[in-house]
Image (spheres, rainbow, N blue to C red):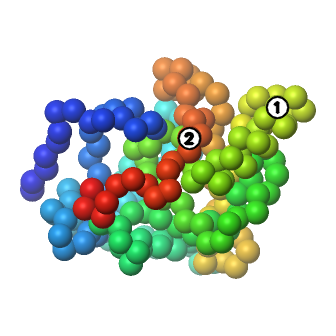
């Protein structure tokens, strides 16, 4: 098993400046083997629902979901030039400050447990910021900053809803994870990054 880390990592916001042990398995041929790709594990389960009781489980056996359970199908972004198969899913809807936001076409969410908060392309970030400012007096800053991401599932119109945690979390030493930042379009990185 080969794994290397960098002595320094440049922080571009939301990553804390630390080196990460990536749990991506599939990759483009030009990319060196990933950590997870060198193991027999086929399934990664991350449960972040309860602060202080997070769960990371790796398994060589496929998941056996309950009959009728809503599953989130992954989108392979290698088809559009990504170097690895990120954990990405189609977005059914976004809600900022309690309001549904019109999506500018097809939107994909990249789920990254090593990223703090949420990064949005400029058009969506501007909509988020405008709603946050407009609703702050009515909802308070916490309510106005609320974000819900509804992911497409295998069960028709029944999305999986991800809610951004608000405020400082005692279980994490008072750290806050409700950071929303704009990302440039295009990402500013080439396909070999």
Measuring from the top left, give residue 38's x and y in whole percent: 16, 63
Where's residue 83, x and y in %? Answer: 29, 66
Please report the residue visible at 26 percent of the width from the left and 46 percent of the height from the top. 21
Q: Is residue 185 above or below residue 92?
A: above
Question: With 180 as the anchor, is 57 left or right in this view?
Answer: left
Which residue occupies the foreground of this view, 171 or 189? 189
158 up-or-down from 170: above or below:
below
Crowding at dot 1, Cα within 10 Å, few <14 / some 14-19 / many 20+, comes out as some
What residue does disc 2 label?
Answer: 181
Label at residue 28: none
Closer to us: 25 or 9: 9
Q: Which mark is residue 136?
A: 1
The reply to whether residue 46 is in sight is no
52 horizontally vs 40: left or right: right
Residue at x 81% of width, y 47% of height: 98
User: Of helix, strand and loop, which one carries label 1?
Assistant: helix
The image shows residue 139 at horizontal and vertical percentages of 85, 33
Looking at the rendered image, the quarter that the N terminus falls into is bottom left
Q: Residue at x 61, y 78 (%)?
A: 154
- First of labels 1, 2 by sequence position: 1
């Amino acid at each position: 098993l080969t794994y290397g880390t960098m002595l320094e990592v440049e922080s571009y916001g939301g990553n804390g400046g630390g080196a990460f042990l990536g749990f991506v398995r599939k990759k483009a041929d030009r990319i060196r083997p990933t950590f997870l790709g060198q193991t027999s594990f086929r399934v990664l389960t991350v449960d972040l629902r309860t602060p202080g009781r997070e769960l990371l489980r790796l398994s060589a056996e496929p998941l056996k979901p309950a009959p009728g359970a809503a599953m989130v199908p992954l989108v392979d972004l290698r088809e559009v030039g990504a170097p690895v198969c990120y954990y990405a899913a189609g977005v059914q809807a976004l809600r900022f400050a309690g309001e549904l936001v019109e999506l500018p076409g097809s939107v994909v969410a990249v789920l990254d447990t090593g990223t703090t908060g949420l990064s949005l392309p400029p058009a969506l970030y501007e909509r988020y910021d405008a709603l946050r400012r407009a609703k702050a007096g009515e909802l308070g800053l916490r309510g106005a900053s609320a974000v819900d991401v509804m992911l497409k599932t295998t069960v028709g119109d029944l999305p999986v809803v991800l809610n951004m945690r608000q405020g400082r979390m005692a279980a994490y030493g008072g750290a806050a994870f409700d950071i929303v930042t704009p990302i440039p379009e295009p990402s500013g990185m080439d396909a070999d990054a």
